[in-house]
Image (cartoon, grey):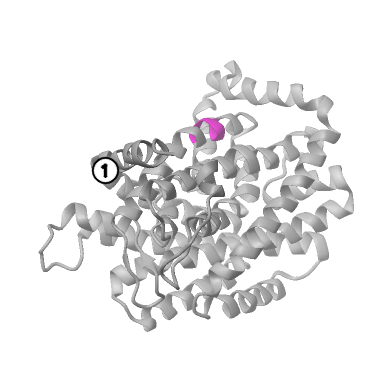
Amino acid sequence: MMRVTLESNRKGEQEAISGVQALIVSTACRVGMGNLVGVVAAISAGGAGAVFWMWVLALLESSTAYIEATLAQLYKEKDPLYGGFRGGPAYYLHHLFIKDGSKRKHSVIASMFALSGLICWCGISQVTSNSITSSFKNAFSIPPLYTALALVLVAAVIVLRKNATVKVLDIMVPIMAACYFFIAIYIILKNAGQLPAVFARIFTEAFGLRQVVGGGLGAVIMNGAKRGLFSNEAGSGSSPCAAAAAETSHPAKVGLLQALGVFIDTIVICSCSAMIMLLTPEELTSGLQGMDLLQTAMRYHLGEFGIIFIAVILLLFSLSTFLGILFYARSNVAYLFGDNWLSQTLYKILALIMLFVGGLAAYQFVWDLGDVGVGLMTIFNMIALFPLAPQALSALRDYEENVIGKR
């Protein structure tokens, strides 16, 4: 994975993106508000033990991310609107159910995946806005209405311009991820003496007798798995929409990059968020949920600067997530409605409306809408992954034997 990441990325297609740029786009969604709000929600609902199940699922989901990204490369198409390539689960599902030479333009399962993806991303648009307005209200006492309006205006300037998304994410994602990572490392090192107790709590609550007897073990596992999937997206079929857009010398290289993205997201960044919260005394966070819990933890570690920092970093994380999901949506909109700018623009406007509404909506509602969309996408995507996985594994063997083996 690291070898592929460090390789030069020359592109033949002028409008195509490189494998690393595809990783950045997918990382924009993975390393987004799911790493902050998702981890907060997992710990709020499932306790510290949910973190352990996020780790376990991430290791398994890395292999899923490889399979779906490689398949996206194998079944990608030219993109006549944006240039470069497009693809994703809707396209490999289409090839799975529609024979070559058939005049049918749509597969039922592929269409259902594409539609559930568009529903999911509208839900995520609301989650991003809701998280930002809550944090800015806590940090700066700014009314949610004003924050939502400003966010929509900034997002509109970017997403309504052709191919501006990747350029913005190329700059934004590495900077925001590095800032958050180093602040988190500072907090962890500052509280290094408490780490053994934190890890003991994670493992105790992951397998604890109290959770089993109380019937809470299922909730611990479910919340860890659900929020882990919401964060790293592996298996849901989102990141293959970015993976398909990459131009590369071998499909397996993009698959390996996407597998690395899951590791970066959950094992590294989500763990940082978990440590920030679990290193905070329980009496300070008891009964708190959502942004209140996260900002209380940051105030404990960094004072008032912590509240301001987490508000700004959440803005960047959430904006990058929104930009990333609209990049994903391109291929699904094209599959459902054909190659025309009208449908592409109308979906962007719908997402911007949802972004605004989310800033004023109830917290649980926006999570539920996103969860339903992610669940449907994952079900439809898995229908294709099992029968088509041998093709992706064959690509990996070919890469190992004919590319790595000859170096």
Residue 86: name its quadrant: bottom left
- Our reading of the magenta stretch's main secondary structure is helix
Please give left or right for residue 177 compared with residue 321 in the image.
right
Residue type marked 1: Gln
In magenta, the rendered stretch is 53-57
Mark 1 crowdedness (10 Å alpha carbons): few <14, some 14-19, many ≥20: some
Q: Which residue in the rendered view is the most extreme toward the top? A: 209
Residue 214: name its quadrant: top right
Q: Position of residue 193 (x, y in %)?
A: 83, 25
Q: Is residue 98 above or below residue 345?
A: above
Q: Is residue 329 above or below residue 98?
A: below
Residue plotted at (35% across, 54% down): 73
Please give left or right for residue 157 compared with residue 73 in the image.
right
Residue plotted at (45% across, 73% down): 14
Q: Which residue in the rendered view is the most extreme toward the right? A: 303
Q: Is residue 169 above or below residue 46?
A: below
Q: Position of residue 393 (x, y in %)?
A: 31, 38
Q: Secondary structure at mark 1?
A: helix
Q: Which residue in the rendered view is the most extreme toward the front? A: 407
Residue plotted at (33% across, 71% down): 334
Residue 321 appears anywhere in the view: yes
Residue 122 appears anywhere in the view: no
For this rendering, which residue is in front, 247 or 241?
A: 247
Q: Position of residue 60 (x, y in %)?
A: 45, 33
Residue where numbered disc 1 is placed? 391
Please give left or right for residue 69 compared with residue 355 in the image.
left
Q: Position of residue 228 (x, y in %)?
A: 53, 41
Residue plotted at (47% across, 56% down): 19
For this rendering, which residue is in front, 188 or 251?
A: 251
Tell whether position 188 is magenta: no
> Which quarter of the rendered picture does the C terminus lie within?
top left
